[in-house]
Amino acid sequence: MIPINYEKKAIRGKLTPTILGYIAGIIDGEGSIFIAKIKNRHSSSWQYLMKASCAMSQKKPIDMLARLFNNHWTTCQYRPGKKETYKPSYQWMVTGIQALGFLRIIYPYLWIKREQAMVGIEFQELKMKEAQEKRGKILEDSVMRKREEYYRKMKELNGVITAATTKQEDAEKRCDSLNSIEILRGESEAVLPPQN
């Protein structure tokens, strides 16, 4: 099984650079890129699943993600507010090889979660390669150790770079706006408007 070729949608004009930039902004601000570690029900081993998701109280962006990236491995959920004063939330998620296809196409447009996306892409590509080589065989300890390394690296990145922070001192440490603009200008000249 290969990742869905979202590039075909881009060629047909459904995923324009403007739309992909908007989607990347949603993922940078409200999304998550992570590796889940789940205990196998039928054995004592662990499973590692790469996921990309977005949850928010606004339904339209979630509907757009579902429409553009919908497939059999996509999850969309409605969650009522836990309290009467809370707004309901909507969540979209892709897993595994479908998350790989999604990250490949939005990667050039990401700023905040660019490192997480690269780790996720590397992890899933390696996992697919291992699956082909080890089909029907028990995975070696070295393979599981490598997956654990990716899991820990992603966890570390997500501990440092978050979608939002409520502490002022954390905000100042993590997002000095002038420094961020200088860094981004060096990485992505084409995206930022020219200086006067």
Image (cartoon, rainbow, N blue to C red):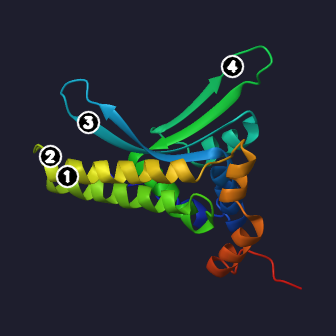
Please, which residue is most extreme toward the front here?
169
- Amino acid type of the residue that numbered disc 2 sits on in the rendered structure: Leu
The residue carrying mark 2 is 139
* Image coordinates for residue 72, horizontal then vertical, percent: 46, 38
Residues under numbered marks 1 and 2 in contact, where contact means CB atoms less than 8 Å apart: yes
Question: In the displayed image of the protein, which residue is found farthest to the right?
Answer: 196
**Residue located beneath label 4 in the image:** 80
* Other-residue count near label 2 (Cα within 10 Å), few / some / many at <14 / 14–19 / ≥20: few
**Between residues 173 and 131, which one lies in front from this camera angle?**
173
Q: How far apart in space, not on screen, are marks 2 and 4 (Cα)? A: 41 Å
Using a 10 Å C-alpha cutoff, classify the residue at mark 3 as few (fewer than 14 neighbours), some (14 to 19) or many (20 or more). some
Residue picked out by circle 3? 46
**Local secondary structure at mark 1:** helix
Between the C-alphas of marks 1 and 2, the distance is 6 Å
Task: Name which residue type carries label 3.
Answer: Trp
Q: Residue at x 59, y 38 (%)?
A: 92
Residue holding disc 1: 143
Q: Is residue 139 left or right of residue 108?
A: left
Q: In the figure, 168 relative to 195: above or below? A: above
- The mark lying in front, picked from 1 and 4, is 1
Mark 3 or mark 1, earlier in chain: 3
| Dots 3, 4 in contact, CB < 8 A | no
At mark 4, the secondary structure is loop
Q: Nearer the viewer, residue 116 or 138?
A: 116
User: Is any atom of residue 163 visible in this view?
Assistant: yes
* Residue at the spot 62% in from the left edge and 77% down from the top edge: 187
Name the element at disc 3: strand
Q: Amino acid at mark 1?
A: Val
Would residue 179 appear left or right of 195 to someone viewing this image?
left
Q: Which of the two discs, 3 and 4, labels the residue nearer the N terminus? A: 3
